[in-house]
Amino acid sequence: MSDARALARAYLEQQRLVGGDAVVLPGGSGIGARGAEGPRPESRAPSPEPQGDLPPPGLSFDPPSGDLFSTDPIQQAADLDAVARLVAECTKCRLCESRTHTVPGEGPAHARLVVVGEGPGRTEDATGRPFVGQAGELLTKILAAIDWPREQVFICNVVKCRAPENRVPLYDEIAACRPYLFRQIELLAPKVILAMGGTAAQTLLDTKQSLGALRNKLHRFRGTALIVTYHPAALLRNPNWKRPTWDDVRIARRLLDR
Ligand code: URA
Ligand code: SF4
């Protein structure tokens, strides 16, 4: 690697750590600051033209998916039920100790929209179903507002077991659990992913950038369009965020229609 490239790479990594914006290549495709052979800093373009009524490109995360010969049971899970069965027996992190039920997620296997939250709350832990408490009721309304009934959406979370007192899941818990989420998305092959809240957005885009920095961009997860918005629980606390959330889900809807 040339010195200039090494320098560019170090610069991009710094940018990523301080929560800098996505780097946009002149060709128009946005990549994350950890993009393979990073572009030189001077190729950082001014805000690109939005594509029609869509937001500018953002980050792109391409975690490797399992190959045919993988012996990892998660990679071998042939369908969503198989993933759920593995989750039900999972003890890969400490959250297994305090859970009542695992909450793998639910929805049709052919769902075109996947909604990802943070992790089960009290009601979810009690029932084994995602987004069924207060935040879930709001999610149902948000989906109804874009005319995309909840029954047609696969709804899940980054971690599949409730964290004590609903604290934010810790880094190692997320790292232990995310292979289930990634496999679910791989099996679903949706058209659009809606990441609700910072934990979902940062996990799916492999970034530490803030929710504010990630919103209103068209990101990609393994090539699939990914939109970031506020978590419904945050909306319950801060109604000012309802308007931007509405804007975000309408973008998701437009992508579904394309
Ligand atoms: N909050 C989440 O992030 N997920 C749920 O399933 C419920 C509340
Ligand atoms: Fe396993 Fe995920 Fe539950 Fe941790 S949170 S025990 S990794 S299913």
Image (spheres, rainbow, N blue to C red):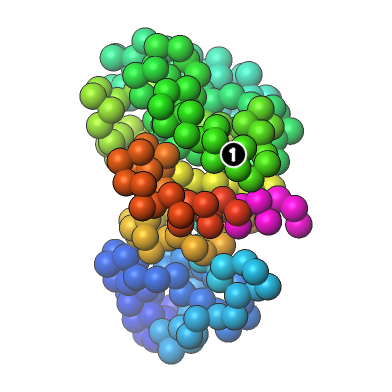
Q: Residue 153 at x, y = what percent?
A: 64, 34
Name the kind of residue labelled 1 in the image.
Answer: Leu
Q: Residue 172 at x, y = what percent?
A: 30, 36
Q: Nearer the viewer, residue 19 or 241?
A: 241
Is 5 above or below relative to 234? below
Is 114 above or below relative to 33? above
For the C terminus, give its image quadrant.
bottom right
> Can residue 25 be seen at all in this image of the molecule?
yes
Q: Nearer the viewer, residue 221 or 62?
A: 221
Q: Residue at x 43, y 65 (%)?
A: 34
Residue 211, by quadrant, is bottom left
Residue 159, by quadrant, is top left
Q: Which residues are magenta?
A: 251-258
Left/right of residue 172 with respect to residue 125 in the rendered view: left
For the N terminus, give its image quadrant.
bottom left
Q: Quadrant of ligand 1?
A: top left
Q: Is residue 254 magenta?
A: yes
Instruction: Say what secondary structure mark 1 lies in.
Output: helix
Q: Nearer the viewer, residue 155 or 8?
A: 155
Q: Residue furthest bottom?
A: 42
Q: Which residue is mark 1?
A: 143
> Can residue 2 be seen at all in this image of the molecule?
no
Q: Nearer the viewer, residue 170 or 35?
A: 170
Give the main secondary structure, helix, strand or loop, of the magenta stretch: helix
Residue 96, by quadrant, is top left
